[in-house]
Image (spheres, rainbow, N blue to C red):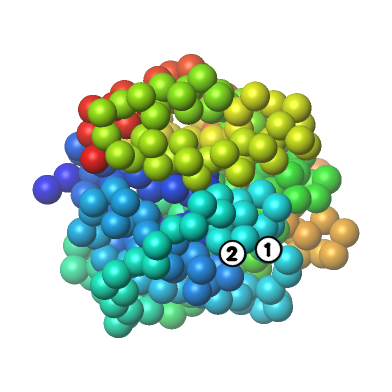
């Protein structure tokens, strides 16, 4: 029995790294994997969650969630980053034992009541499932312990538009509902995830460990790494989602500031996270009882990578 986590994801290659890390971490008990559209449509994202569950030899149940943003139609899916299948186009076998009975947001609500005050959510895709939880049960904040979000940007600009990070852009209305909720939130945005690189030599080390997971992660990451080579001349990749998972287990690797986060829903700046830092003078601020959240603004990236490799070597299957 470890720290209880619900893992909300849109796998996605960097999602796979984060999920393997969290599932194998000795102090964490992932009680459910909930899926959301994002890197790929929901049916593929859910199938990928099953593939990852099988490959990591986990028994954690998977729950299918939102197929589209709360109020908007789906946009384009980034097949050029994660592959047509979202997991690097390496001809994965179809997963066995697909069992879908409860919808993702209902699973989260049921779990919160089953374990009041104990559930931590790690959310590394668009925030639609979490917004659905809050919309269905506005008082749920009283019994959810925390949410760690990979998403947003304070001073780092955007990665899907000049100002927006992809997860927030993909459902800005949902993200704003989440940032407005009273659940304790930690935002791990591009200010820190653009400082954490998994290098090609780190990926080689992963594949040398005495387990299958490291080799699997290496195989799926070839496509992702190629994207970073071609578009940014990088020898490796950003480690967005795993950085959020590691911020949950090891917040001491990060510096945080407090602020209120608002999400732009305008067409020009859609998905921009506008941060009003706590205790700073601001000429204008929207008063809607929004809470300050923790926003990561610095990271000791070497420690993040070292921690990932340590968990991979010692605990992944
Ligand atoms: C985020 O967007 C997705 O493509 C990644 O999986 C990550 O969650 C980075 O902006
Ligand atoms: Ca993701």
Helix, strand or loop for disc 1? loop
Q: Give residue 40's mark.
A: 2
- Residue at coordinates 37% horizontally, 54% vertically from top-left? 52
Specify whether residue 4 is in view: no
Whether ligand 1 has any atom under 8 Å from the Cβ at mark 1 is answered as: no
| Marks 1 and 2 in Cβ contact (< 8 Å) | yes
- Residue at coordinates 58% horizontally, 70% vertically from top-left? 41
Question: In terms of sequence position, does the residue under pointer 1 or pointer 2 come before the other?
Answer: 2
The answer to which quarter of the image holds residue 140 is bottom left
Which quadrant of the rendered structure holds the C terminus? Answer: top left
Q: Label 1 vs label 2: CA separation?
A: 6 Å
- Residue at coordinates 57% horizontally, 39% vertically from top-left? 222
| Nearer the observer, 69 or 316 | 316
Q: Residue furthest right?
A: 268
Indicate the position of residue 190 as horizontal and vertical percent values.
64, 38
Name the residue that disc number 1 marks. Answer: 77
The image shows a total of numbered marks equal to 2
| Nearer the observer, 44 or 30 | 44
| Nearer the observer, 82 or 254 | 82
| Nearer the observer, 293 or 196 | 196
Q: Is residue 200 left or right of residue 282?
A: left
- Residue at coordinates 49% horizontally, 57% vertically from top-left? 91
Whether ligand 1 has any atom under 8 Å from the Cβ at mark 2 is answered as: no
């Amino acid at each position: 029995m470890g720290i209880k986590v619900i893992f909300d994801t849109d796998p996605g290659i960097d999602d796979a790294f984060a999920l393997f890390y969290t599932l194998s971490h000795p102090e964490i008990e992932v009680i459910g994997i909930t899926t959301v559209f994002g890197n790929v449509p929901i049916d593929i994202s859910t199938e990928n969650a099953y593939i990852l569950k099988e490959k990591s030899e986990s028994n954690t149940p998977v729950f299918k969630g939102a197929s589209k943003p709360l109020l908007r139609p789906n946009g384009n899916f980034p097949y050029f980053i994660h592959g047509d299948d979202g997991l690097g186009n390496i001809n994965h076998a179809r997963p066995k034992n697909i069992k879908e009975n409860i919808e993702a947001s209902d699973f989260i609500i049921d779990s919160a009541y089953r374990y009041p005050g104990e559930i931590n959510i790690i959310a590394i895709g668009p925030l639609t499932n979490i917004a659905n939880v809050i919309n269905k049960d506005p008082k749920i904040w009283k019994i959810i312990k925390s949410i760690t979000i990979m998403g947003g940007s304070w001073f780092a600009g955007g990665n899907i538009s000049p100002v927006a990070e992809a997860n927030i852009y993909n459902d800005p209305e949902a993200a704003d509902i989440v940032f407005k909720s009273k659940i304790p939130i930690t935002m791990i945005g591009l200010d820190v995830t653009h400082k954490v690189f998994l290098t090609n030599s780190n990926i080689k080390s992963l594949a040398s460990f005495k387990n299958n997971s490291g080799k699997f992660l290496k195989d799926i990451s070839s496509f992702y790494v190629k994207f970073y080579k071609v578009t940014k001349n990088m020898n490796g990749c950003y480690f967005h989602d795993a950085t959020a998972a590691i911020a949950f287990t090891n917040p001491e690797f990060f510096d945080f500031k407090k602020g209120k986060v608002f999400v732009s829903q305008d067409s020009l700046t859609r998905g921009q996270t506008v941060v009003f830092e706590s205790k700073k003078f601001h000429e204008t601020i929207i008063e809607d009882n929004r809470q300050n959240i923790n926003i990561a603004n610095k990271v000791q990236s070497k420690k993040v990578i070292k921690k990932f490799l340590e968990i991979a070597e010692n605990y992944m299957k």
